[in-house]
Amino acid sequence: AQSVAQPEDQVNVAEGNPLTVKCTYSVSGNPYLFWYVQYPNRGLQFLLKYITGDNLVKGSYGFEAEFNKSQTSFHLKKPSALVSDSALYFCAVRPRGRGNNRLAFGKGNQVVVIP
Amino acid sequence: NAGVTQTPKFQVLKTGQSMTLQCAQDMNHEYMSWYRQDPGMGLRLIHYSVGAGITDQGEVPNGYNVSRSTTEDFPLRLLSAAPSQTSVYFCASSPPGTGPEQYFGPGTRLTVT
């Protein structure tokens, strides 16, 4: 079975400070890893993904994430947070395998960027 | 492209009523899925389909039915609504290939009284 843990319910950060949203996972083999963002009353938007190669992945809106195989983590980061980054962030994992697109999501982290 | 569309946006049902949540995509994606989102629980997979004529259960399938007669459409049916099915429902699709991301619709907010 696959599972995703996002240990913090809410992350508060001052505008301009670095932002980190934590994610750890449990799945057999080397999974595909994803981050999505959800703004109020909207669907989920794709931010970035790790498939293979460089452990540091760059995505939309200045976000990046670092894959750490030994710690089974995929933390989302942004060097300088904006008020507009306030949203709900979801980490998701998908096992490798042909035809297997089933995503398992974490419970989400509410990010609040304080002006 | 319209992407993934869902109707209705909001719905209120009485316990025991049935209804169908519509989902359509115009990207010719093979894979489609339905999730429900509940506070503090993230998104949970209800049903999914890897292509027309093929569907399978996710982690919370009870009380829901799906069918996939075309590549474009993937409706979700609530057979006899219960208050526990009050939730926000999202449809998603993705193309084949290596590690594709899923594209999400705007959601349907369902309240069962």
Image (cartoon, coloured by chain):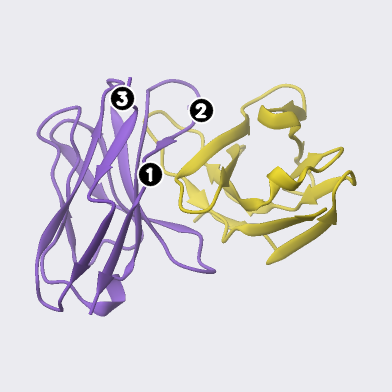
**Image position, residue A9 (x, y; %):** 68, 67
Q: Amino acid at mark 3?
A: His
- In the figure, B69 relative to B64: above or below? above
Disc 3/disc 2 C-alpha distance (Å) = 14 Å
Mark pair 1, 2: CA separation: 22 Å
Q: A79 above or below A19?
A: above
Q: Residue at x 46, y 47 (%)?
A: A42
- Residue type at mark 2 is Gly
Chain identifier matching the purple colour in the rendered picture? B
Q: Colour of chain A?
A: yellow
Rendering coords of residue A27 (x, y %): 58, 49
Q: Would you say the residues marked 1 and 3 are in contact, meaning their CB atoms lie under 8 Å apart?
A: no
Foreground mark, 1 or 2? 1
The residue under label 2 is B99
Residue where numbered disc 3 is placed: B29
Label 3 residue SS: loop
Task: Please indicate, yes or no, whether residue B18 appears anywhere in the rendered image.
Answer: yes
